[in-house]
Amino acid sequence: MDILLDLNRGSLSYGDAVWVNGPLQKEQTTQPFTQVVAQRLYIKLTCFTGEWVLNTQYGVPYWNILGQKVSKASVDLILQQKILEERGVKELISFSSTLQNRQYSLTFRVRVVTGEISEPITITPLL
């Protein structure tokens, strides 16, 4: 269980923790396990390697991708590997990505170690 992030792109608090006045409520935490893993993946796939001072190996090596002539297939492979190495992920069920006007976006679903399948997870990293 983690503190829930607001992942609604239309929200003014997008990417921030969901807070309500008073003690932490169950609705402010990630549940079920598929949501826990989905939020971990969102955080990991939007973090540049070296950005988190407590673990400089965490994240995606976007600095090796930005400004380089890296194919979409290579970026797909890097991100698929990052998804599969996340704790709690058993397998990648589906994966699709687009690259239009230098804007990369991916949508995927994973099976978690409990056997459940996540809702589609869409991420548009800052590439």
Image (cartoon, rainbow, N blue to C red):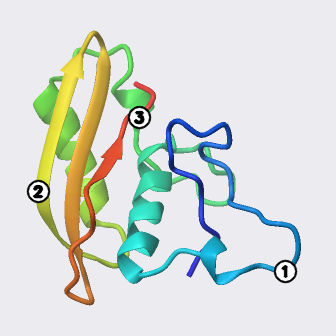
Q: Are marks 3 and 1 in contact (CB under 8 Å)?
A: no
Quadrant of the rendered image containing residue 119 = bottom left
Q: Secondary structure at mark 3?
A: loop
Question: Residue 107 location, x and y as percent?
Answer: 23, 46
Amino acid marked by disc 2: Ser
Residue at figure coordinates x 51%, y 50% from the top left: 7
Mark 2 closeness class: few <14, some 14–19, many ≥20 residues within 10 Å: few
Residue at figure coordinates x 41%, y 34% from the top left: 125
Amino acid marked by disc 3: Pro
Quadrant of the rendered image containing residue 103 = top left
Is 121 left, or right, of 36 in this rendering? Answer: left
Amino acid marked by disc 1: Pro
Sequence-wise, the earlier of marks 3 and 1 is 1
Sequence-wise, the earlier of marks 1 and 2 is 1
Q: Identify the residue position indicated by label 3 in the image.
A: 125
Q: Is residue 126 above or below residue 41?
A: above
Question: Residue 98 location, x and y as percent?
Answer: 18, 28
Sequence-wise, the earlier of marks 3 and 2 is 2
Q: Residue furthest bottom?
A: 114
Q: Identify the residue position indicated by label 1 in the image.
A: 23
